[in-house]
Amino acid sequence: MTTFTNYPILVTGASTGIGHHLTHYLAARGHPVYATARKPQDLEMLAKIEMVTPIELDVRNPTHVQRALTLVTERGQGLYGLVNNAGLGELGLCVTWTDEELINLFDINVFGPHRMTNAFVRLLIEAQGRIINIGSQGGMITSKYYGPYTMTKHALEAYTQALHLELEPYGVWVSVVQPGGIVTNAGQNASSGTLAKIQRATPPFKDEADQILEAFQQPSVPQPDAPESATNRKPSSPEIVSRAVYEALFSPTPKIRYLVGTHWEGNRVLHALIEKLLDENDNPMHNYSRDQLIALLDEHLGQRQTP
């Protein structure tokens, strides 16, 4: 890939995890980075990174978003890339979540990217730039106890697709990066809220909730020599997410979706999508035969083959 430098990029949620790694990754490659965080100590830490301008920003706060837009505009360098990374991940039975908690989760994970995009879209059009949403493999599959979180990531998938269709004619490409398990402290940040939701479970859900709490308190130890499985997860480095974001930002032929993670995670997603396809096809009003499905798959594979 051609080496690009000096393309201004804004990264939300840059204090820890994926956002922090990406900030270092982009700055090390010569790109001015506007890195957002909420806490003063995180802003001070970001200010020490060369090529990085820290911005205090909570994506739920329209005043913060407008202030960030003013700062970037006054710099006069424009904005080539917006990476909507800020997010919250929590677990729990759906029936234990309050309306307020679910609204807050959507406010961060869905409305946050929407606010940021609406604020910066004109700068991005001027730069013929890119928008990268950090989604999740949970945007395509749903696991037990991940309901509210995967609801937001499914919504982000739809938002990415719609935004791509609307902005591509104006020269802005929109992609979503879909990580699996990543070594970050996101789980630690969310653990207190997760435990509170599980602890408030009442019958008939209390026995199940107690089992979940016990699993939290006595987590299984990963077995590095054993194959990865649902009970032996092997999180990836945030490096793989940063590489995917970089490709989405600078590839001359970017993709809309970047699935990143382990081989086991990729298999899980593809098998789940096939199951969805078969469920949709199992319909008296709309049903392809096995041969028709294979022919349809071959047709689409042929369309994707590079010359």
Image: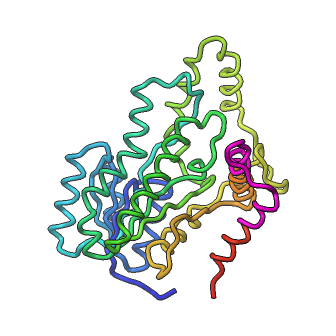
Residue pictured at 64% horizontal, 59% vertical: 236
Q: Is residue 115 above or below residue 262?
A: above
Q: Position of residue 135 (x, y in %)?
A: 51, 54
Residue 50 visible? The answer is: no
Q: Is 23 above or below relative to 146? A: below
Magenta residue check for 229: no
| Residue 27 % position (x, y) | 39, 73
Left or right for 260, reference 296: left
The magenta segment is: 275-296
The answer to whether residue 287 is magenta is yes
Question: Which quarter of the rendering shows the C terminus?
Answer: bottom right
Residue at x 54%, y 71% (from the top left corner): 243
Q: As displayed, is residue 205 above or below residue 2?
A: above
Residue ID at (37%, 56%)? 12
Q: How is the image coloured?
A: rainbow
Residue 102 in sight in this render: yes
Of all residues shown, which one is farthest toward the right?
A: 226
**Number of labelled discs?**
0
Q: Position of residue 184 (x, y in %)?
A: 55, 52
Residue 297: name its quadrant.
bottom right
Q: Give the left or right position of residue 234, taking residue 252 as reference.
A: right
Residue extending furthest top?
Answer: 203
- In the rendered image, residue 52, in percent from the top left (x then y), is placed at 32, 68
Observer-nearest residue: 101 or 182? 101
Q: Nearer the viewer, residue 127 or 239?
A: 127
Which sits in the foreground, 296 or 156? 296
What type of secondary structure mainly makes up the magenta span? helix
